[in-house]
Amino acid sequence: MKKLCFLFCLVLFAVSGLRAQEIDCPEPDFIGETVFVNPDDGTPVKLEKQTVLLRSRVNATGIMFGIGKAKTKMIVEGPSAAVRLDGSKPIRLIVKAVDNDTDPMAIINIFRFEHSKKQRLAELSSVSSFGSVKSGKLDYVPFTGQKYGESSYLLTLDEREPGEYGITVRNPNNLDEKSVIVSTFAIE
């Protein structure tokens, strides 16, 4: 009888532990919006959205002698994100997309920014005068994704290094791509 009671308590404890791992947050309201799921209590925290500025620059050597590089950078004003996450705990994000039929790796980018006192930037591409073109130069962060709700994804960051980060969502159906919007956060 004691063994049966102990076994029942053990199963009950295991089931309640599994239930605690489940997420019960509503999906974000709009396509491209991202919420962080607080690991302590499961509450959603909406990430700050920023419109980016795309800037291309050619170094002085390229202008004067025709030898050099042109770089295109994505710039977000402000030195740091308002939402700060604890890197010692799991980081899970819910990202709303048009639908969740596409592989999230194909439409969602999570990348690291370089930051200065006034802004955060990420290099998108570079072109040298000798013809070499490098695109996709963003410092991508690996993640795992799964379907969540009707049109969202639940993402788990595989790496949690301190720094400033951004998330962009591409639309495979081209319904909402009017400007580049980045959801920003920082890991401490």
Image (cartoon, rainbow, N blue to C red):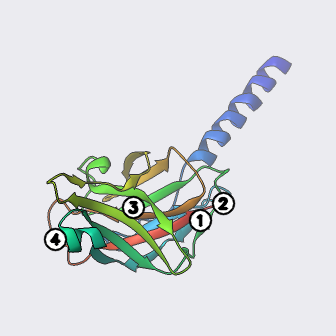
In space, the residues marked 3 and 1 are separated at their CA atoms by 15 Å
Left or right: 55 as drawn, with respect to 26: left
Residue sticking out furthest to the front? 65
Task: Give amino acid for label 2.
Answer: Asp
The answer to whether the residue labelled 2 contacts the one labelled 3, judged by CB atoms less than 8 Å apart, is: no
Badge 1 crowding class, 10 Å Cα cut-off, few under 14, some 14 to 19, many 20 or more, is: some
Whether residue 133 is visible, yes or no, is yes
Tag 4–tag 2 contact (CB < 8 Å):
no
- Rounded to the nearest angstrom, the CA distance separating label 4 from label 2 is 34 Å
Numbered disc in front, either 4 or 1: 4
Give the spatial CA distance, label 4 vs label 1. 29 Å
Q: Which residue is mark 4?
A: 175
- Residue identifier under label 1: 43
For this rendering, which residue is in front, 76 or 23? 76
Q: CA distance from mark 3 to mark 4?
A: 16 Å
Q: Which residue is mark 3?
A: 95
Distance from Cα at disc 2 to Cα at disc 1: 6 Å
Task: Examine the rendered structure and indicate whether residue 142 appears above or below residue 130.
Answer: above
> What's the amino acid at mark 1?
Thr
Where residue 142 sits, quadrant-wise, is top left
Q: Secondary structure at mark 2?
A: loop
Q: Nearer the viewer, mark 2 or mark 3?
A: 3
Give the residue number, with chain letter if any, for mark 2: 41
Q: Earlier in the sequence, mark 4 or mark 2?
A: 2
Location of residue 134 with respect to 113 vertically, above or below: above
Identify the mark nearer the N-term, 3 or 1: 1
Placement of 107 over or under 8, stated as above or below: below
In contact (CB < 8 Å): disc 2 and disc 1: yes
Q: Is residue 13 above or below residue 35?
A: above
User: Could you say which quadrant of the image residue 111 lies in?
Assistant: bottom left
